[in-house]
Image: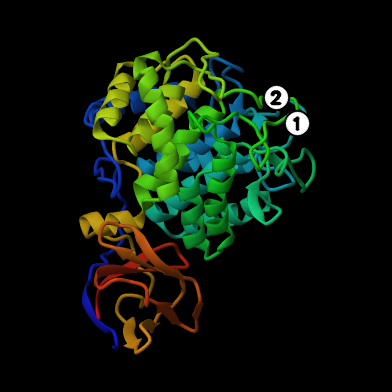
Amino acid sequence: AGLSIALVANIAQGAVTYPYTDAIKYPFGFQSSKFTDATFQEWYTQYKSSKLIADCNGGKRTTCVGEDGEATTKVESMGWAAIIAAYMGDKTTYDGLIKFYKSKLQSHGMMDWKTGCNGDVDDDKGSASDGDLDVAFGAVVAAWQWGGSYVNDAKAIINTCKKLIVSCNGTSVLAAGMGSGGNSPYGGCSETDLSYYTPAFFREFAKFTGDNAWSKLADDTYYILEKTANQSTGLVPDWHTYNGQPYSGSRNGKTYHYDACRVPWRMAIDYLWNGNERALAWCKKVTDWANKVGASNIKDGYSPDGNPTGSYNNQAFVGAFATAAMCNTQTISDAFADQMAKLKTNTGYWYHGFLGTIYTLTMTGHMWTPDLLAKQTGVQLKTTSATASAMVVTNVSNRTLNISGMKNVSNIDLTSMNGQIVKQTENISNGTATMDVSSVKRGCYLLSIRGTDGKVSTTQVVLMK
């Protein structure tokens, strides 16, 4: 039998800047009320006043107070700060950060990993992949927020970061960074770090640019994670090979420490946003283990089998488990959120200030995508021209959607009403596309048309056999 299709009201609206005060409920997982918006605002205010400095020729930079000193800026903190500022709708801060970031780009097109306002603090002009990738995602959020030139800016940063993807026997892997003074990536197959991988961000890069290399990297992240994680605890070392062996060089390949502590946050987002089952499985395993230890007893370092090597209970470790606990149960989510609320913002140490702020931004529902906004609020960011008004969807007998009348479209998603992606296509030519829905059950779905400028038009579709 053929496929009947009903196109319901198109819900795309005009351009908006989505303010931080309008939190969302993630389509998957558990959100806790133990860490409140009021506490988050207090943390954010202290973070902004103590961790950001406007002293660089009109730019704004992050500072590593408590470790390398106020004069030092690391690219990883620039990435977190860019994401936070864009989600907070703080255009002045975001613009200052991106100005400083661009002023420190090296010949390889990425920021010097460790620098200062007026000059470098060491002779190593190499990059660190996690920081540049987070800056790229901050740029995507800025494009969602403000459109215009921010769209091309985000695409340029993403395309530069693509050189960090290397192939290891067909598996897409992130290099550790770009070498000092050259255009060649270093590390990768024998030297990579799961705390540099954020699959949910990579999926948004793919949607934003139409480049499926990012989708493959997102999926292949789980090959690396599953090979590397301890079978009992789920813990991973800071550095390792792509196929799960501990790194044998000068970096820490033995313990779950101040790199690896960020992995639970990075994986959790892919479940909270997309319902990724592999993210769920790992986050549940690692937080089952962490819950047995107890949120107030978590230390800042462990061997992969769970023996403590650290001494302190702090935001960098507890907060990451708190985000991953959102993938487990309400009880476990509440326990870790409650412990985060009890911890001080620790304004003296840069790492906790940045990570604590971005973790709690996630925990309180302030990290969104345009697709999530459309599904939950009915409000959509600015659409590309003609995607809403001229789009036509028809069907043929072999259960294929024919979509036509589009302009400047990069990809199309068919999602369930609770936000899970059912089908995707990037095979768009001359404003037309097809989507095989032969395996899709009848019911109500959302067809999201993402333009090359990063904006989305969403139409409700009812599939009936």
Would you call the spot at circle 2 few (<14 residues within 10 Å), some (14-19), or many (20 or more)?
Answer: some
| Front residue (pair 371, 252) | 252
Seen from the viewer's position, the closer of residues 433 and 401 is 401
Q: Which mark identifies residue 291?
A: none
Q: Is residue 48 visible?
A: no
Residue drawn at 35 percent across, 15 percent down: 296
Residue at figure coordinates x 50%, y 35% from the top left: 263
Q: Label 1: few (<14), some or many (≥20) within 10 Å?
A: some
Disc 2 marks a residue whose amino acid type is Val
- The numbered mark at residue 121 is 2
Identify the residue under disc 1. Answer: 124
Left/right placement of residue 4 relative to residue 137 reads left
Query: Would you say 330 lies left or right of 285 here?
Result: left
* Horizontal side, residue 13 vs residue 176: left or right: left
Q: Nearer the viewer, mark 1 or mark 2?
A: 1
The residue depicted at 79 percent of the width and 44 percent of the height is: 182
Q: CA distance from mark 1 to mark 2?
A: 9 Å
In the orientation shown, which residue stands out farthest toward the front?
232
